Amino acid sequence: MTPADLAALDTAVAQSPRAVGVPAANWNWKAVRRSVVDQPGKQRKRSRCFRALHRLGVVVKRPKKRLLKANAVKRAQFMRDYAHLQREAEISGA
């Protein structure tokens, strides 16, 4: 990625993916590739997208699989709380 591409991605990552026209909930390698693919003549592999996010200080995290083994009631409550927090974050621009 060129320094100009990295600067543009840095500006984009400061916002939600949807705000810059990428249909994704969070910034991950697929969202980065989607934002770069929209530029003619450019296509990035998964590893390049991960490296670009890493250079910008973005950490991609996944929920642990142990959540699937949790109590069903607690899991449902967590999922409701998490969805609420994500909506609040999108509204506030966090």
Image: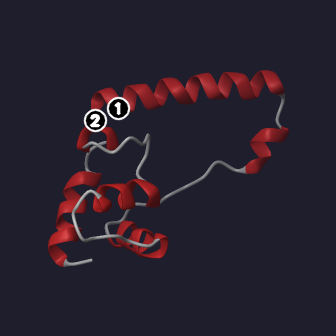
Quick one: quadrant of the N terminus? bottom left
Q: Mark 1 falls on what kind of element?
A: helix
Give the residue at x 75% y 49%: 65
Residue at which label 1 appears: 90
Question: Looking at the rendering, which quadrant does residue 67 occupy?
Answer: top right
The residues tagged by marks 2 and 1 sit, at their Cα atoms, a distance apart of: 5 Å
Colour setting = secondary structure
Give the residue at x 42% y 26%: 87
| 12 to 40, vertically: above or below | above
Quick one: quadrant of the C terminus? top left
Which label was assigned to residue 17? Answer: none
In the displayed image of the protein, which residue is found farthest to the left?
4
Q: Mark 2 falls on what kind of element?
A: loop
Q: Nearer the viewer, residue 50 or 90?
A: 50
Cβ–Cβ below 8 Å for labels 2 and 1? yes
**Horizontal and vertical percent position of residue 58:** 39, 61
Left or right of 2, for residue 50: right
Specify the amino acid type for callout 1. Glu
Left or right of 68, for residue 1: left
Q: Residues within 10 Å of mark 1 (few under 14, many from 20)?
A: some
| 2 to 29, vertically: above or below | below
| 27 to 55, vertically: above or below | above
Question: Looking at the rendering, which quadrant does residue 23 occupy?
Answer: top left
Give the residue at x 22% y 61%: 39
Residue at which label 2 appears: 93
Q: Nearer the viewer, residue 40 or 13?
A: 40
| 12 to 48, vertically: above or below | above
Give the residue at x 30% y 56%: 35
